[in-house]
Image (cartoon, grey):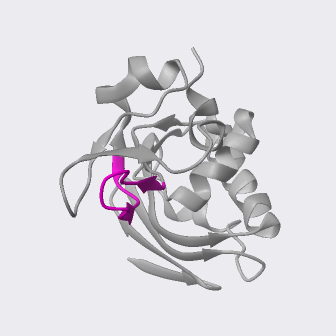
Amino acid sequence: MTLHIGRLEVEIRGARAIMIGRLDDSVSLTELPAQLPAGAITLDTSGITFVNSLGMREWMRLTRALRDRGNTITLDRVADVLMTQLNLFGDLARMATITSFHAQYVCPVCGAEATPLVDVAEHAPLLRTQKAPHLPCPECRAAMDLGDFPERYLSVFKG
């Protein structure tokens, strides 16, 4: 089932909701919890391209409504634009388990920029110390560095 909510498309596949588009003033997520099953659910946000303050308000309402009805929430493939927002609102990130996220990376060798997927379980010890893993550059395979301040992506993992 696919829902069109303002500029956001939500594809529901069992207990997984895949979000594509914008979390902005066009979005009202109040009806979404009723479309999701009880129990454990996964929100895949890799397709979110933009988040503003009104979109974050809707995100907060969604995660609180899901938690209040007893869902456990896993955030998978969190878009970089949402990840930076979750780090501003630490309590929001703690309402869910983050399994992976995208972050802005830059290659010091060839200058390539990318938003690779960071696996939280694989890099948990490093993330807890607020250090980003070095990931292979898609262009030259050299070790890429996080291209932003670690706090913008990693504060939610403080040990």
Vertical side of 151 occupied by 13: above or below: below
Please name the residue shown 79% across and 59% down the image: 57
Q: Position of residue 138 (x, y in %)?
A: 23, 60
Q: Which residues are magenta?
A: 104-117
**Front residue (pair 15, 101):** 101
Q: Is residue 148 left or right of residue 2?
A: right
Residue 92 appears in which quarter of the rendering? top right
Pick the residue in front: 52 or 6.
52
Residue 37 horizontal/vertical position (percent)? 45, 53
Q: Report the front residue among 17 and 107.
A: 107
Q: Please indicate whether residue 75 sits to the left or right of residue 153 in the image.
A: left
Quadrant (top left, top right, bottom left, bottom right) of the N terminus: bottom left
Residue 76, percent from left and from top: 40, 48
Which residue lies at the image location 64% right of the left edge and 50% below the top edge? 84
Residue 149: image quadrant is top right
Residue 69 located within the stretch drawn in magenta: no
Residue 94 in view, yes or no: no
Is residue 9 visible to the viewer in this orientation of the structure?
A: yes
Principal secondary structure, stretch drawn in magenta: loop
Q: Residue at x 49, y 27 (%)?
A: 131
Is residue 69 positioned above or below 60 on the image?
Answer: above
| Position of residue 13 measured from the top left corner of the image (x, y, whole percent) | 32, 64
Please identify the quadrant where the C terminus is shown.
Answer: top right
Q: Is residue 14 above or below residue 84?
A: below
